[in-house]
Image: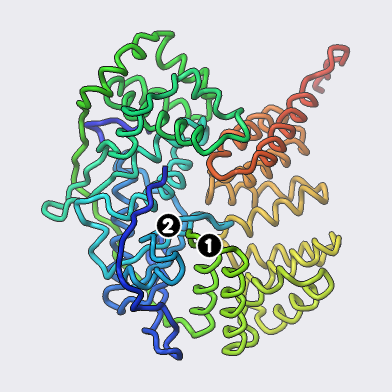
């Protein structure tokens, strides 16, 4: 499943313009908002209905273009959350008028925020979609490569972020060099591959160090795909089978290090191949529903708190809170608003709110999830929490976090056999999430499946990449060490005879 030519830094776009448009709810003079669901995307937008549906299909095309990196038949599950504003000026209110798009993470996968009136995703330019392509590539590559050293993860995402779909012939263009990253390595040089292999263990890096690692990772991946495609494809095939990355690389390159000498010429000459291939058909069915005013205020609250820019955190939170206040005026029992508000309540108040919410919205899995979390916060590990977790997982079958939370409940209550099924569902839905992988590792450990526990723990450690705090990285390392230590048979242990 490796990226092969012939077979087949998050750069945020800046723009200028006047602040003459706001993404308001209709009651405040804004355009109507709607949610459009396609096979792999949930798009919340203030675009007109036809443009909104078309944009959801374009996102399916965008995703399909990225998946060509691993072959036409590769099509993993999962739904990506998207907030799409009608034009770039709508985003200025949240980003100091500096950014045209950004991407982040939710417990269930990436959230992509973009602008445009339909059609812009197909433009034969990099534009503001590089940010979203980078994050979407991270998300999708985890389905193809369950083991990824950090340099491979970042290098592949940067390699894929320049994907374009040519409007003229509907061909996917893959493998263009990133102008910004190429300029960086030509000006500042690059790290050796040996130095990049050590990246996984590094903590507390400065911005300059991170930039050097990201650029070097892109360069090495771009070079190896172009100059040593067969071997790099073999390497990826071994990662796809879950093999240890360093050993897999050594085996694929058979100890040959001659590939390193040609990298300088590669950078200086800038000669490389580009893959061009037809875009396969994508699902075009969409379902649309109108969003209520409270939904719009929740979206605005999210944008105020998560958008990049120089607005102080306190001011962001103040504006977000005002949006939530208005959402509750519109709908006093709005589930998503109350879930966000519950984060600020003490444990007793949160539990009371959650119980009321479940009573009023018994068919909403988010309410049951809030109840389960409130019970956990109150140290209630009884069957009441189990039932809440089960109900949330039942009502949210496509939510990796709901499935994982149920599995983790069984870890904490030492009922591993009951946790294996939801853990496996969570991994299937989101194989690149380290917390989800760690849950399955813990269940394997509790059931005595030591070898699988260690392998899954190492895989969880592999998938800790950008944005992960150093403390979390150290915690995962300690967990793997515990598994490795306790899974080593005692030298004095007597063999067990089978009957």
Badge 1: how crowded within 10 Å, few (<14), some, or many (20+)? some
Lateral position of residue 214 relative to residue 117, left or right: right
Name the image quarter holding residue 281: bottom left
Residue 77, placed above or below residue 81: above
Does label 1 or label 2 sit earlier along the sequence?
2
Residue 306 is marked as: 1
Lateral position of residue 186 relative to residue 344, left or right: left
Q: In which quarter of the image is the C terminus?
A: top right
Name the image quarter holding residue 462: top right
Alpha-carbon span between mark 1 and mark 2: 9 Å
Q: Quadrant of the N terminus?
A: top left
Determine the secondary structure under disc 2.
strand
Residue 102 is marked as: 2
Lateral position of residue 380 relative to residue 7, left or right: right
**Residue that appears at 40% across and 24% down:** 190
Determine the secondary structure under disc 1.
helix
Viewer-side residue, 131 vs 50? 131
**Residue that appears at 43% across and 59% down:** 112
**Residue 424: x percent and y percent?**
61, 47
Instruction: Determine contact: label 1, label 2, CB under 8 Å.
Output: yes
């Amino acid at each position: 499943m490796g990226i092969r030519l012939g077979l087949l830094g998050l750069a945020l776009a800046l723009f200028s313009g006047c602040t003459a448009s706001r993404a308001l709810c209709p009651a405040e003079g804004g355009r109507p908002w709607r949610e459009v669901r396609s096979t792999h995307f949930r798009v919340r937008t203030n675009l007109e209905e036809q443009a909104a549906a078309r944009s959801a299909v374009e996102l399916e095309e965008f995703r399909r273009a990225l998946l060509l990196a691993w072959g036409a038949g590769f099509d993993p599950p999962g739904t990506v959350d998207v907030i799409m504003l009608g034009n770039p000026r709508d985003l200025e209110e949240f980003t100091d008028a500096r950014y045209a798009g950004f991407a982040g993470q939710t417990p269930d996968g990436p959230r992509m925020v973009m602008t445009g009136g339909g059609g812009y995703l197909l433009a034969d330019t990099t534009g503001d979609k590089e940010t979203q392509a980078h994050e979407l590539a991270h998300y999708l590559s985890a389905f193809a490569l369950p083991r990824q050293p950090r340099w491979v993860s970042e290098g592949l995402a940067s390699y894929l972020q320049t994907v374009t779909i040519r409007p003229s012939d509907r061909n996917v263009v893959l493998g263009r060099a990133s102008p910004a990253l190429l300029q960086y390595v030509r000006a500042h040089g690059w790290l050796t591959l040996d130095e990049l292999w050590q990246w996984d263990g590094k903590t507390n890096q400065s911005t300059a160090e991170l930039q050097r690692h990201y650029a070097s990772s892109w360069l090495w991946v771009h070079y190896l795909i172009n100059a040593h495609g067969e071997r790099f494809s073999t390497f990826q095939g071994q990662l796809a089978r879950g093999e240890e990355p360093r050993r897999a690389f050594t085996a694929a390159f058979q100890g040959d290090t001659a590939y390193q000498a040609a990298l300088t010429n590669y950078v200086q000459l800038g000669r490389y191949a580009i893959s061009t291939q037809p875009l396969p058909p994508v699902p075009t069915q969409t379902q649309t529903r109108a969003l209520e005013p409270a939904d719009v205020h929740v979206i605005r609250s999210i944008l105020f708190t998560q958008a990049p820019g120089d607005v102080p955190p306190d001011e962001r939170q103040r504006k977000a809170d005002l949006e939530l206040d208005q959402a509750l005026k519109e709908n006093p029992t709005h589930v998503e608003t109350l879930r966000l508000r519950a984060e600020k309540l003490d444990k007793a108040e949160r539990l009371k709110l959650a119980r009321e919410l479940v009573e009023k919205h018994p068919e909403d899995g988010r309410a049951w999830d809030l109840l389960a979390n409130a019970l956990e916060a109150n140290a209630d590990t009884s069957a009441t929490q189990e039932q809440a977790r089960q109900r949330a997982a039942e009502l949210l079958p496509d939510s990796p976090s709901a499935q994982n939370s149920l599995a983790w409940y069984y870890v904490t209550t030492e009922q591993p056999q009951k946790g294996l099924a939801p853990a496996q569902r969570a991994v299937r839905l989101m194989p690149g999430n380290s917390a989800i992988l760690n849950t399955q590792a813990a269940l394997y450990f509790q059931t005595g499946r030591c070898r699988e526990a260690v392998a899954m723990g190492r895989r969880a450690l592999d998938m800790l990449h950008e944005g992960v705090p150093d403390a979390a990285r150290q915690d995962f390392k300690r967990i793997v060490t515990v598994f490795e230590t306790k899974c080593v048979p005692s030298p004095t242990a007597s063999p067990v005879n089978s009957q």
